[in-house]
Image (cartoon, coloured by chain):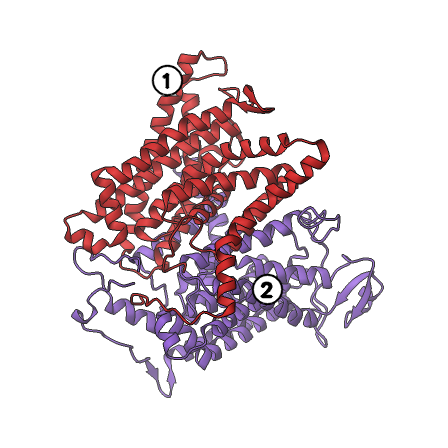
Chain colours: A purple, B red
Amino acid sequence: MSTETPRMATKPRGLKLPRKVGPFELSTIVAAVAILVAIFVPFYFDSGSGFMNDATVALVYVVMALGLNIVVGFAGLLDLGYVAFFAIGAYTMGWLGSTWFSGESIHIGVAEQLSSQPGIHLNWLIVLPIAAIAAATLGAILGFPTLRLRGDYIAIVTLAFGEIVGRVAVNSDDGVFGIGHFNLTNGRAGITPVDKIDIPLVERFTTLNLRPWYWTALALALVVLFINFRLRDSRIGRAWIAIREDEVAAVSMGIPTVRVKLLAYALGAAMGGMAGTFLGSFYNTVNADQFEFSFSIFVLAMIILGGLGSIWGVVVGALLLSYINTNLIPDVLNDVPSKIGLDFDVTELGFGIFGFLLVIMMVLRPQGLIPERRHQAEFDVAEPTEGGDFVVETRA
Amino acid sequence: MESASIPVRPSRSRADVAREVISKYGLIAILLVLPVAYGIQDLQDDGSLTRLATNIKDGLSNGAIWALIAVGYTLVYGIIELINFAHGDLFMIGSFVAYSLIGTIGLTVGAGTAELFFGLLLILFITMIATGTLNTMIERVAYRPLRNAPKLAPLITAVGFSFILQNIGLLWLGGSHRGVPDLINTQEDYVTIFGVPITHGDLLALVVTVPLFFFLINFISRSRIGRAMRATAQDPQAARLMGINVDTTISFTFLLGGLMAGAAGLIYALYQTDVWFFSGFTAGLIAFTAAVMGGIGNIKGAILGGLIIGCIQQISDNRIGTEWTPAIVFGYLVLILVFRPQGLLGEETREAG
């Protein structure tokens, strides 16, 4: 942007120092308490209850949101096709952990009951890295054409890419692009059943007892959370933020933008892929209807609600939005229209509500619920001047 | 907020030269792949190109609709460099308005020619005004407050508004497809030229879009406010210094884009005899592809792109399968953005270059 608001006029407040309680930062204590609560919460709920189900899914959403946060929040590349990586992960689980390829008979590390079934059956712990690598590769491939582009063009390419993956998922029950007749994805009917997650030395996962699922999801979320923190504070993380803030300056400081950007895409995608394997197994089905554009927006709304680039914000945003999605809209808000004399189904409007949320957040609190410190500082500095000073990009 | 880019011209290596050639002629070559391949196949199969010509004719009619929508993208992008994601859904709202008005005015299949003509003209005007006003309002609520914000912000509100409009459509007419009465006997042949039947639907597309494009191009190049729009697109601050009310000009741009989307909505409703709340999403993406193909920010380019995309879409619908069409169109979009982001007629912009 060549036209700049006169920033020097307002006094920059700069980065605020974190509040401290004793030797620890306040946020560290809050986080530790929250994690402890998350670990012990299943004991207070029925092991097969709806709450456990929702909580498990919410934790997987946290993983996805953290993955997308690397691309959008850290590196500033708006990715609207994130659902593609969820799809890749889920299909990897579907292909490598079900009776789908019934011509094959490969069994690695699975329980005895499964060993007699046809198809490829790999343990989830093996599928997880495979899916992560597959998604990361795809992420890098997707990232490649966007390297020359900037801004909203990236959004469109990623969106188109996500749509292509979605279309392939829907239509590949009879050849890909009309070539051949191989049934790759089984379209909307989907691949089902999918093998349950099976972790050695732990009791078998069933649909009745959701606690092991929950703890697995929690473990996945915590690992990804840890990776996120380490990445953010690393050399790469600083490079991402530099690119986000000013690409030209970042390049002239010697940051290898190509490698760094591709890494952001690949890592973000890997997390989406890992979450995909879990959900594929948890839902017991992988079908094309799960991979619609609106899901990308759903995940994007999480990180925007929480605060772009702010890791804890993203966690809160993901939990909050999945609560809104699974509880608030169907259970609480569903009575509202009939009370005010209107007749419609609120659950149908879920995405309208998310859209509204996006607009409201962007207009009123663009930094999110728990802003990243650096972002907050920027917003403190760049208050809109009186009379709405005009900043529009001009053509060079 | 990066500062103005400095054009860097590194010494040209062989790879650069190759890339330049691909960029210049690659897009045209890619565009010609489908028609040429199927043209050869047609000649082998039945010795004439009638089927291909019919495809292209249908494609041009469809393309007129995409072109009308694409113009809205290109106008807005030209002036504030924002991809107005909600534009496709605005078109959907336009088709819904047209559908409802047909019911309200009471036009039925058996209506006389004069009645039909004036009725449709009235519907066209009301639809255009409705979508135009709506687009201006969206700009006021969702984009104007964010002029100072980072670039990602208005894009995200645009996505948000896209969902809001979709859900308005869902509330309005429900989730299922609605059939529009076939007022003009869309599929009936009017004349046949070289074995290619020209239907009433094609005629409608021609009669509505050509005057609109003529008006639009002249308006932008000749009128006072058109000049203001071009000035604002070039340099908003300088335009402001010259006494142009930039905010009004931008509002007006959104109004123009909305008008075109409304017209597209009416043609679509009559031509496809079907409206659906989700049609805007795909239409928006196709039209955006068209705008990018022609060179975003360039109105003639958007029209050209719309017509080309229409043909590609029709050929793919007819030969490969309807279900693959979106994937093929988006594939083209990615290819264009990779090899020639400035499009067919556009100049290199900083964003894309």
Q: Amino acid at mark 2?
A: Leu
- Judging by the rendered image, the residue that carries numbered circle 2 is A138
Callout 1 environment at 10 Å: few (<14), some (14 to 19), or many (20+)? Answer: few
How far from the left and from the top, in percent, is residue A264?
49, 70
Write down the quadrant of residue B115 in the picture. Answer: top left
Q: Name the residue: 44% across, 41% down.
A: B304
The circle on residue A96 is: none
How far from the left and from the top, in percent, is residue A303?
44, 63
Which residue is nearer to you in this view: A209 or A326? A326
Q: Mark 1, chain letter?
A: B
How far from the left and from the top, in percent, is residue A232?
44, 77
- Judging by the rendered image, the residue that carries numbered circle 1 is B118
The image shows a total of numbered marks equal to 2
How far from the left and from the top, in percent, is residue B39?
64, 38
Element at badge 2? Answer: helix
Residue placed farthest to the bottom in the image?
A23
Badge 1 and badge 2 in a common chain? no
Write down the quadrant of residue A366 in the picture. Answer: bottom left
Alpha-carbon distance for marks 1 and 2?
Answer: 54 Å
Above/below status of A232 relative to B222: below
Q: Amino acid at mark 1?
A: Phe
Above/below status of B71 relative to A201: above
- Any part of residue B167 in sight: no
Callout 2 environment at 10 Å: few (<14), some (14 to 19), or many (20+)? Answer: some
Q: Name the residue: 22% across, 48% down.
A: B247
Viewport quadrant of the N terminus of chain B? bottom left
- Any part of residue B201 in sight: yes
Residue placed farthest to the right in the image?
A116
Q: Mark 2, chain letter?
A: A
